[in-house]
Each structure stands twice: as structure tokens, then as C-alpha cells.
Amino acid sequence: MLAFIIRRFLIAIPLVIVSSFLVFIMVASSGTPQPLENARLRPNPNPAQIRVLELRYHLDKPLVTRYWLWLKDAAHGDLGVDNNSRPVGEQLRQGMLVTLRLVVVALVIAILIALVVGVVSALRQYSVFDYSSTFASFLFFSLPVFWLAVLLKEFGAIRFNNLIGHTWVYTVGEQSVRLPHSFWARMGDYAGHMVLPCLTLVLISFAQYSRFTRASMLETMNADYVRTATAKGATRKRVVTRHALRNALIPVTTVVALDFGAVLGGAIITERVFQWRGMGTLLIRGVTQYDPNLVQGWLMVTAVTVVVFNLLADITYAWLDPRIRL
Amino acid sequence: MSQSSTSVTTPEDAEAVRGPTGPGPEREFTVAARSQRSMVARRFIRHRLAAASLVVLVFVILLSLVGGRLWKYDYSRTYSDFPINGGPSLDHPLGTDSVGHDLFAQVLRGAQKSVQIMLLVAIVSTTIGIVIGAVAGYYRGFIDAILMRLIDLILTIPLLVIAAVLSVRASKSGSFALALVLGALVWTTLARIVRAEVLSLREKEFVEAARALGASDRRIIFKHLLPNVTGSIIVSSTLTMATAILLETALSFLGLGIKSPETSLGKLVSDGATAAQTRPWLFYGPGFFIIVIVLCVNFIGDGLRDAFDPKQTRVRA
């Protein structure tokens, strides 16, 4: 098992490095950094200032040299500074903490709900429950993320707060500006801010997972080994959980892992709607202001997160399916 | 997909297997011979939800393509006698916005742009996906490894994010460039599906036979392999269209997609998002169109998947 993990890890490293190079080219060719652009477009441009800025972004050097400089710093954990000379690494760390809090909680809830819904609708195929959950899934993955988010924000939050008599569900930010002192009150504050963004992500992602769980559960329930298990007298519960579900989980794991990027994308939009200061805000700032270091750092941190997540999925995979344990 | 198990590979071969269609004079009794295509069509029509979705989608697409010319108001003009911020009325079924545009005219225009983007993305991504998938699956080895690592690379970064970074520049050159960028990004799923099927098909006897007859690689790929993968390709491209519309919507919401004076459903609905409480029609009108289009596309994709699946015997209501 350990050897398997190490080998997967070693494959992941070149992937991240090549990805960083391609991303570097992409970022470099997407535009001129904002301060430089501003300096050049000024009514009477100051050549000295332009020169200083060009040197700051290493624009006097060829692309490959620039990449090498960036990579050397990045290998030491230094992702450079953004257009406003603030360190990128620190901003990304804070942004990632906020975003991962949202994504991980939403993902866990979505997977749990999807498994229950998927398994039940597979066991009762063509029942009312099956039809309504199918329709709900189709509806939810046909909704634009931010449309659902705005809907929940404008209507869910206000109705709910009126119902319970005080404001617990917040629609702006990831925490209150002044956090309460006691631990539980603080956790309550985090939770209140998280309800709606989390609900948005859960609804969007559970839809796809539950469809997939249903399909792969249907397949395993019709498999010969499940019939054998029933024939030899295993209880229904045991057949479903030990024989069918465990095998059905294998393809589901793949989908969850492959879909992780899409969930991150959804999180960016959700954050934007609810004005969280997470990765989404950073990305939009970086992209609209042509902030090369910020965007580059952002993409690399995300790429590493996705790769780590896929690695976790691979490990889960090996654990679920003893046949591929190498 | 296991439709590969039929030895029918090209339409001409199929013709030969079935014999001449229609009751020939020399035949004593006729067996209702059904081509695979008509079988798929029958299964699809029996899938009522999918068939209904197809009708709705065709209607919406026609409406978006020609509706703008037929509607009494122009999408870009503001009329002085319009109510500003007026709610839906008989004259303006979706109301008017803060400048005095008729929103229905704008939605028609936006739908036209979104549908164009959707179709273009589907065409571009399907072409790339088929070629890369078929080449990787057919030649295997080094080429396959390189192409599959390329897909892994693309997948290390969320689709929306690459699209966001690339479209900052592309969206300045208009919706056409944006659609090309999106199309160049969303082919990965299709390429994987095509590759997997080609990998198994290329070992089949009919490919061996074709090769023995001296068919070129290109002929084998396009005449013998790809026709057997048609089902999966159609299903996957259909679902890509849904992805394309949602991606465009998301990008426009982030301010990185369609720029004015052009408009799209995504842009309209994100403009309306800030007014969801006070002027809900700005938000629901265009949003409703997006949902109808995407929902229909998804239902059609689902119906096609069932229709192409030879294992599927029971047709769902």
C-alpha cells in the first residue's frame, strides 16, 4: 500500500511541474500587468518608470528564464509578490483555508446525501421516490450555480431568519467582522455564514453523484455475485451493503475525484455571490488586473490541491477494490 | 459500448446484411428489417420526456434564431414611450430594464448568442475529442501516453478557471473567440470515451479483415471504428452543450464572458442578479430560458443514452 502511494506521488510531481510551465506560458501571454499597462498608457509616459516596472516583472528576460526564476523561488515556497507588492503565498494560504472549509464540508454532505438517495432509488427503481429524485437531480445540475445561489440568498435567508426570529443565516462574508469571544458562539457564527453557500454547492454536486450512484448500484444489483450472495442466504441488508454497495462505490469514487475541479469552480462562483474572501475573490482580482504572480500562484496551488485530491481518490480506490492493490 | 458486437460496420455492409429494403419481388415473405438507426429513433421517441424535450428545444432554438426579427421591438433600441423598470405586461411579456430596453427582445437576442456559442462549442470540442480519442486509441503506445497525459494536465486545473484566464483576452475579440476557447477545453471527456471504445474495437475481427484487405489507417478509423462509436459520441456531445451554456453563464457572471454591447443569457441573468429582490423579472426571465435549454439538453442526452444502449430493453416513461 505504501509503495503504491509513493509511486502515485512520484507520478504526480512531474505532472505538477509540466502543468506549472504550461500555466506560466498561458499567464504570460494573457496580457500586460496592470501597473505596467497604466504606466505605458499615461499621457506622457515616463521611460524610467516603465523600465523599473519591466525589470520588476523580469520582462527583459526570455520566457524560459522567467519561468526558471519563478520555479526556483516557488521551490523554496516563495510565490513572489502581487501587483501591490503583497506576498502571494500568504494571501493564497488564507484564501485556501476559507475555500477548502466550504468545499470539504459541502462535498462530504453531498456525497452522503447522494449515496443514500442513489442507493434507495436504485433499490426501488421506477418508484415515486426514484422518479422524483431523478427529476430533482436533473433540475439541479441544469441550474446555473449563481442563479441558485442568488435564489437561496434572496429568498431562503430572509424567510428563514424571519421564521426563527433573529439573524442566524448570513448572506455576506465567511464570518462576522467582529467574532464573538466564546468558542461555541464563534462556531455558530461560522456555521451561520456557511449554511447558504454550502447548501448551494451541495445541491449542485449531489445531483450528479446521486445519478451516478444509482446507475452503478443498479449495475451491481444485477450482477451474478449479488444473486449468488442472495442464493446462499445472506440477508438483504448484507447483500446490499457488503456485496453491492462496496462495488458500486468504485466508479462513484472516480466521478467524485474527476469532478473535484468542477466543485472548486462552483465554489468560486458561490463565493462571489456570498462575498467570501476566498480563492474566488483572489482569482477574479488576479485575472482582471493581469496580476501574473497572483494568477500563477493561484493556479499552482489549485493544481496541487486537485492532484492531492486525486491521490486520495486513488488510495480510496485501492482500499475499496482489493484487486488493484499492487 | 457493446453495439460493437454487431458485425455491421458501414452503411454499405449493413445494406448487404439486411438485403434490399422493401418487399422485393423474389422474396416470399418479408421480415420487418429495422436498421439500427430506426431502432434508436423508435427507442428515443418512446422515451417521452426526451422526445418532448427535443420538441421544446427545437422550438426554443428556432425562437432564438428568428424570433428577434419577428418581435415588435428591437433589442438594442430604447424607446422613449417605454415604462422604465416596468414589470411584465401584455406589451412587454418580460418587462423592461432600467434603461428602457424591452427585456423579451433582449432575451431573444441573448438566447441567440448563447445557442450559437453552445453549437459552436459542441462542434469544436466534438471534432477535437474524436480525433484525439481515435488517434490515441488506435495507435496506442507513445502517442497515446502523450495525449492522455495532456488530458491529465488539462484536468489539473478547474475548467472554469482555465476558461476564465484564457477568456479575458478572447472575450475582447467577441463571442466567436470565446466559443472557440471553450470548445478547445471541454473535449477531454469525449476523447477519453472514444479512446476507450477504439481500444477495444481495434482488436475485433472486422478491423483485422479491413486491414487484410489493405485499408489505410485513415479508412479503418473513419469507416470502420468511428461509426461504431457514434452513439457515445452523440450522447457526449449533447451533454457538452449543456456544459457550454453553463460555462458561458458562469463566465459572464464573473465578468469574464460576453461583453456589452453583445449580450447573452448569462450576461442578462447576471445583470439581473443584483435586482432579484426589487425587479425579479430581470432575473427570472433570462434564467428561465437558461434552465429550459439546459434541462432539455440533459433530458435529450439521457434519452439518447438509453436509446443507443442495446442492453436497454425496458423503455422508461
Image (spheres, coloured by chain):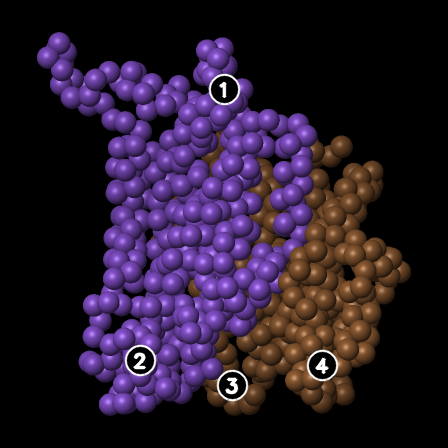
Chain colours: A brown, B purple
Have a look at marks 2 and 4 and say if they share a chain.
Answer: no
Asked if the residues shown at circle 2 and circle 4 are in contact, with their CB atoms under 8 angstroms apart, the answer is no
For label 2, the residue is B77
> What residue sits 43% from the left and 83% below the top?
B275
Chain of the residue on which disc 1 is drawn: B
Pointer 3 or 4: first along the chain: 4
* CA separation in Å, label 2 and label 4: 40 Å
For label 4, the residue is A45
Asked if the residues shown at circle 3 and circle 4 are in contact, with their CB atoms under 8 angstroms apart, the answer is no
For label 3, the residue is A161
* CA separation in Å, label 1 and label 4: 62 Å
**Residue A97 point in image, percent of width and height:** 73, 69
**Residue B19 point in image, percent of width and height:** 24, 16
Q: Quadrant of residue A30?
A: bottom right
Chain of the residue on which disc 2 is drawn: B
Pointer 2 or 1: first along the chain: 2
**Residue A43 point in image, percent of width and height:** 66, 84
For label 1, the residue is B216
Q: Nearer the viewer, residue A254 or A145?
A: A145
Seen in the picture, residue B9 relative to A138 is either above or below; the reply is above
Chain of the residue on which disc 3 is drawn: A
* CA separation in Å, label 2 and label 1: 57 Å
Have a look at marks 2 and 3 and say if they share a chain.
Answer: no
Q: Nearer the viewer, mark 1 or mark 4?
A: 4
